[in-house]
Image: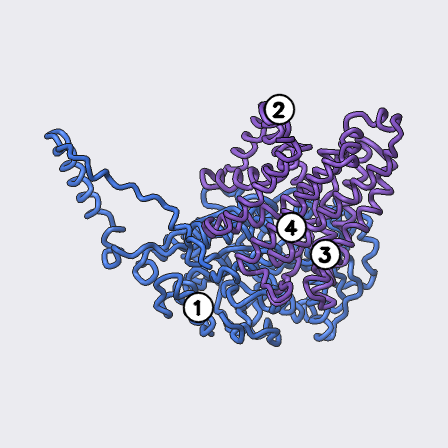
Chain colours: A purple, B blue
Amino acid sequence: MSEIRKSWGLHIGVVTLLLALNFILPDYHHGNLARVMVLACYAMGYNMLFGYTGLLSLGHALFFAAGMYGMSLTVQHLGWSAGPAIIVGLASGLAMSLVVGILSLRTAGVAFMIVTLMFAQAGYLAALYFGEYTRGDEGFVIQKAARQIGGIDLSDPMNRYLAALVLFAVCLFITLRVVQTGFGRVLVAIRENEERTRMLGYDVHLHKLLAILLSGTMSAAAGAGYGLLFGYAGATFASVQYSIFPLLWVLLGGAGTVLGPFVGTLFMFYLIDLSSDISTAYMLIAGLTLVLLTLFAPQGLVGELRRRTLRWLP
Amino acid sequence: MTKSNSDDTKIVKTPPITDTKQPNRRQTIKTLAATTALAAVASTTPLFGRYGQAQSAEPIKIGFQVHRTGIGAAYGRWYNRTTEAAVKKINDEGGINGREVQIVAEDDGTDPKRGAEVVEKLATQHGCDIAFGTLFSHVVIGSAPRAGELKIPYFVVSEGHHVASGMLNRYTLQPGITDVKSQVQAMAPFVNSTLGKKVTMIYPDFAFGHDHRDYFSAAVEAQGGKVVAKIAIPPTESSFTKYFPKIPRDTEVIYHVMVGPAVLTFVKEMGEFFGNSRPEIFGFIDSLEAVDLASPGLEFLEGTYFWEGNPRYAQANQSDYDKAYRAAVGVDNNGASISDSKDVSTYAHMFGCWETLHIVKAGMEASGYKGAGDRAKLIEAVEAMTSMPHSYANPQGAKEFNGKTHQTFGQQYITRVENGRLVLAHTTSIADTYYPDEVDYTSQSF
């Protein structure tokens, strides 16, 4: 079997497994997995830029929040239904990533990190400043009646899970397809050796910009999805810690792997959840585990799997 | 389609039926000794007798969403102590409907995402009867939709206006602490009549500060006063000297509600700016909850006034209820832990946990609550409550609960810093805190 066929088989298998889990998981884990799938989309968006293109952003919460606010503010203040509101969320993420991309790509390395961090901080403060509309740090509830698409109530556990799965599958297959195309290979080439890629005649700047657009829009999709499925939008999601989370998830799962972001998000969620059952000092347990993982699996869980056995993993 | 419940996944281990091994003499003696010891312990343990009539009943599980880490950690520590003390008292008095009360605490990191996850965990993993105890508004608002969807009663102790504003749902109630709107508007008559009519407000530029700005401005103008300046401080600010020159010269009262660690700098710099010729100053104690008034830099607060939900220092007219409550939680007459005088409590807010748990008890007993199937009956029973007299269960003072808005109303305290202690200067009436209903949750279906 060719590596491409194996890749598609594996990823379709993962989505099928997640669909099957919908029918057998107990309530608690069912709800958790729905949330993890949505957040994994955020991580996949981040991975597109960091894992494949080699650009380390510290401001992705801006894109997540753009999607969340783009969707929720139109529902809240314009009375739009959820379907068109999601489009607004995606458009907000796309527009925001275009602006940030054009400006931040004038820098590189540490400066790129700082510029993206500052943009995100400006976004966070803007969410607080326009508190009349956003309710700032307190946030607001997206009422149950507004959380419907085509008559499907997204606050219902089953519908929520399936909607999260659809979003996850779309992001996963887009990522998989992109990394198999020439465009994806150029991104990896930029990550590995930017100068050589430029020398080979590729427009590095354009490829980076497109990567930011794809990454930002995917993150915005996750933000819009989170708001819609869990009924809340607030400035906390624009804060710096929500820029760090996807970095952490991607590093844990495996940067530059298609499944890594999902595995990392899932691992991190249950690491916190299970260690909090053991001790009130659960952050210590989680922290130690992360240190050990970084020491002994520096390429992340899926990255290590690829390095040791499944070398064909995309 | 029905999904399997978490209980279905539990594996019950039973001894193999093919095990025919006979007990030997040593084992028999061991078993006899163990049984005798257990019986002796059981007969002398008060717990055994206390719940004797309800031996087969499961404990009532109260899920406690606690801010153990994150920005709310100091509040969380004291909310936890108050909750444990209240549960001990309730259990010592026979529990709820003869059933022991058990607290299942989960840290929410003072984060709205984790908050929602914690509510899910309490409801579906731990099988709690209710969820309870959240303080920070963004965590409440992030968690309440999930509580509504999971149909678990969610008793918050937040003082946010979110419940009474109608933003949340029928499953979310705030019966043990008043909300910011009523607190703020009840301050206006005292500020206007005693301190001055021209007020400059200094507040953090986020939702909590905006609530103060909007509710207090409206209330003070209704009293014939005037807000002469509104100075919003960005949340990232660490030095405040550039804001003080913005205070108009004709200001008679400064109203401040800064929160977070920068408050010490704020007070110190305000003192340096005004020197000995300051206007009257009125603030919300939220800034200085869990902070020792003897901290360096706070000397400037001498002679200024504070809102307190419940006076931190034991007052001359201290009620027996406050005395007993203070002792039960382990707080000394200065509002600090009896075991560590530097560990200052969040006394102005934490009574809400105590009172809420007693209301939950009263609601469960009035509705004959037996299990999750009776959650709607519990909510209806609480909605039916009105007057709650000043008592050991309500040590902060009498309350009037509004079942339609799911919000309680109660008297507020204004204290003045005298010799480094907060001394009661004024107590508002409950009527001062009323405002027109903004929602009727009872019209929502379960």
Residue type highlighted by circle 4: Leu
Against B150, residue B339 (above or below) is above
On the image, the x and y values in percent for residue B177 come to: 53, 63
User: Are tags 1 and 3 found on a single chain?
Assistant: no
Is B362 situated left or right of A156 in this image?
left
Residue B376 badge:
1
Q: Chain of mark 4?
A: A
Residue B31 badge:
none
The residue located at (52%, 46%) in the rendering is B107
| Viewer-side label of 3, 2 | 2
Are the residues tagged 1 and 2 within 8 Å (C-beta)? no
Residue type highlighted by circle 2: Arg
Q: Chain of mark 3?
A: A
Crowd tier of the residue under label 2, counting other residues whose Cα lies within 10 Å: few below 14, some 14–19, many 20 or above = few
Q: Earlier in the sequence, mark 3 or mark 2?
A: 3
Q: Chain of mark 2?
A: A
The residue located at (42%, 71%) in the rendering is B381
Q: Chain of mark 1?
A: B
Residue assigned mark 3: A69
User: Are tags 4 and 2 found on a single chain?
Assistant: yes
Distance from label 4 to label 2 (Cα)? 29 Å
Is A259 situated left or right of B404 in this image?
right
| Viewer-side label of 1, 2 | 2
Against B61, residue B261 (above or below) is above
Residue, far left: B25
Q: What secondary structure is marked by label 2? A: helix
